[in-house]
């Protein structure tokens, strides 16, 4: 801090031998707090971009596998035929719902056939419905993983940047008090800290906010498709096994 103040004073007094710093030079010559704030914001930004890319690829693959799975589901005449192809479209959340429902149907039919010695029939449609609902919740929790991090980044990073802004302004006032001058060369380092941290906070928050809203919309549409598929599976089960 002392060396930084002396450099600012030298600039303010126009002493020879001191080059006029650029904005980045004055920022990198700032104190450790400004650098710490920038490092935290950079970490949030990097992780959020990684989440955005991974989530976009995940949802794209899920849509593709869901389309293929539903095509096969509608063409097949038996659930066993559908179960045979699930390994090839495992990225689809519909697969998890179908597997949960198929396992419940199979368990009920076996239990009915063994206990009554008659044809296989479903014992409880409500139990099947509960299995499908549990599967929907499980699949939604998996596809929405890390989406909350984007919300956290969008809401927290502007305030982290604001903290850096306030700190930079405090540094600027401190430099004014040390040098006794209000020259731009005196307040420039503190203002540079404030502006760079403000910009970094917004740069981290804006993409995360846009991506969170986009993925939230995609997840809402996916949930509707999953619930529609569960109802279709429930209707087919009631029609064929009761």
Image: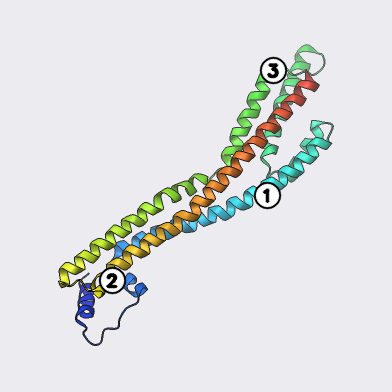
The residue at 52%/51% (across/down) is 210
Choose the circle earlier in sequence order: 3 or 1: 1
Choose the circle earlier in sequence order: 1 or 2: 1
The residue at 66%/19% (across/down) is 126
Compared to residue 140, the image places residue 191 above or below, namely: below
Q: Would you say 204 lies left or right of 159 here?
A: right
Element carrying mark 1: helix
Element carrying mark 2: helix
Label of residue 188 in the image: 2
Question: Which residue has dot 3 on it?
Answer: 124
Of 42 and 196, nearer the camera is: 196
**Which quarter of the rendering shows the N terminus?**
bottom left
Q: Residues within 10 Å of mark 3 (few under 14, many from 20)?
A: few
Element carrying mark 3: loop
**Which quarter of the rendering shows the C terminus?**
top right
Question: Which residue has dot 1 on it?
Answer: 61
- Mark nearest the camera among 3 and 2 is 2
| Residue 95 position by quadrant | top right
Q: Would you say 192 lies left or right of 69 here?
A: left
Compared to residue 114, the image places residue 131 above or below, namely: below
Choose the circle earlier in sequence order: 3 or 2: 3
Rounded to the nearest angstrom, the CA distance separating label 3 from label 1 is 34 Å
How many numbered markers are drawn? 3
Rounded to the nearest angstrom, the CA distance separating label 3 from label 2 is 74 Å
Residue 20: where, in percent of width, then height? 30, 81
Task: Kindly give the residue lying farthest to the top in the view shown.
Answer: 116
- In contact (CB < 8 Å): disc 3 and disc 2: no
């Amino acid at each position: 801090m002392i060396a930084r103040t002396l450099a600012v004073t030298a600039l303010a007094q126009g002493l020879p031998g001191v080059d006029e710093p650029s904005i980045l030079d004055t920022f990198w010559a700032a104190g450790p707090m400004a650098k710490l704030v920038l490092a935290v914001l950079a970490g949030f930004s990097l992780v959020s971009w990684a989440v955005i890319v991974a989530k976009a690829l995940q949802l794209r693959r899920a849509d593709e596998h869901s389309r293929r799975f539903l095509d096969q589901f509608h063409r097949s005449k038996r659930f066993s035929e559908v179960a045979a192809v699930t390994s090839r479209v495992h990225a689809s959340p519909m697969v998890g719902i179908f597997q949960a429902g198929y396992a419940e149907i199979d368990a009920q039919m076996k239990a009915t056939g063994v206990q009554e010695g008659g044809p296989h029939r479903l014992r409880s449609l409500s139990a099947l419905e509960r299995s499908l609902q549990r599967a929907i919740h499980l699949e939604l929790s998996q596809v929405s993983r890390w989406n909350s991090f984007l919300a956290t980044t969008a809401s927290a990073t502007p305030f982290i940047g604001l903290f850096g802004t306030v700190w930079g302004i405090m540094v600027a006032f401190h430099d004014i008090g040390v040098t006794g001058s209000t020259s731009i060369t005196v307040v420039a380092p503190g203002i540079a800290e404030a502006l760079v941290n403000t910009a970094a906070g917004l740069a981290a928050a804006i993409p995360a906010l846009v991506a969170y809203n986009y993925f939230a919309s995609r997840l809402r549409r996916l949930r509707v498709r999953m619930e529609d598929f569960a109802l279709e599976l429930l209707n087919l089960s009631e029609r064929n096994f009761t």
